Amino acid sequence: AQTVTQSQPEMSVQEAETVTLSCTYDTSENNYYLFWYKQPPSRQMILVIRQEAYKQQNATENRFSVNFQKAAKSFSLKISDSQLGDTAMYFCAFIRSSGAGSYQLTFGKGTKLSVIP
Amino acid sequence: GAVVSQHPSRVICKSGTSVKIECRSLDFQATTMFWYRQFPKKSLMLMATSNEGSKATYEQGVEKDKFLINHASLTLSTLTVTSAHPEDSSFYICSARPQGGIETQYFGPGTRLLVL
């Protein structure tokens, strides 16, 4: 079974600063996908960034980037130039790409990020 | 693109009544839809996986007779909470996976259910 661990229940960052959220996962699979989802106070889940395990290059999406370390099973999210609208719960998630249970997301417990003006 | 809607966004009902929640993919076809439940300040808990034209697959501990799921088309899945009780009060979220596409799921805005 896959597990996703987010070791930081809460974090805060000053506006315009950079913050990194950590995520580790455990799997015996070689092919999989990793995601960061954002859930603001509205509770709408929003996809932030996606990484395919077979790609060595770290995914980047504007101010959001990841540090994917496959051997270490680590998938951290870096938010640059933090904005007030980044205040939200951030969930790291894993999905298998094939086999039984594929396409089912496994979520971490989340990190509550507060951006301070 | 990749918009998923849920209706209603909020519902209050009396104990013993049934409530239907609709999940629609607005601009794509979804072979698979998922239903989650989320308790306050907690992560999402997968309840069931719904495939178009077939029976839903329920996660362990989820009562299939309590939470009826129908996925009649490639753009619509419904979750019916039958004979709702106060302990069913929660936030229910659906997601949809595009047909034949990448592994990403797109989420609906959620439905807040309060059973009195």
Image (cartoon, coloured by chain):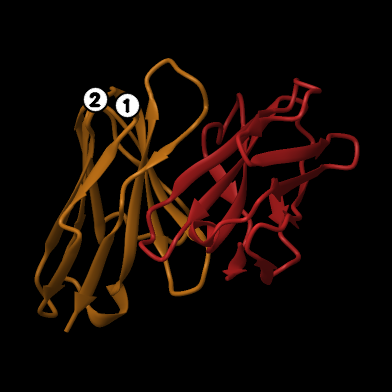
Chain colours: A red, B orange
Q: Which mark is residue B113?
A: none
Same chain for labels 1 and 2? Say yes or no: yes
**Dot 2: within a 10 Å radius of its alpha carbon, few (fewer than 14), some, or many (20 or more) residues?**
many
Element at badge 1? strand
Question: Which kind of residue does numbered mark 2 sit on?
Answer: Leu
Q: Tell me the residue at 61%/26% (across/down).
A: A97
The residue that label 1 is drawn on is B30
Left or right of A76, for residue B109: left
Q: Is residue B81 left or right of residue A2?
A: left
Report in which chain the residue with disc 2 lies: B
> Which amino acid, mark 1?
Ala
Residue visible at 62% across and 55% down?
A82
- Mark count: 2
Locate residue A81, reporting x and y percent. 66, 51
Position of residue A63 in the picture relative to residue B56 (left or right)? right
Q: Residue B35, percent across and down?
A: 36, 49
Query: Disc 1: which chain?
Result: B
First in residue order: circle 1 vs circle 2: 1
Q: Residue at x 57, y 71 (%)?
A: A117
> Residue lying farthest top?
B100
Name the image quarter holding the N terminus of chain B.
Answer: top left
Left or right of B41 in this view: A110: right
Outermost residue toward the right?
A: A71
Q: For residue B97, what is the image quadrant?
A: top left
**Of all residues shown, which one is farthest toward the bottom?**
B116
Q: Are marks 1 and 2 in contact (CB under 8 Å)?
A: yes
Where is A116 relative to B106, above or below? below
- Residue B74, labelled with which disc? 2
Q: CA distance from mark 1 to mark 2?
A: 5 Å
Q: Is residue B112 above or below residue B64?
A: below
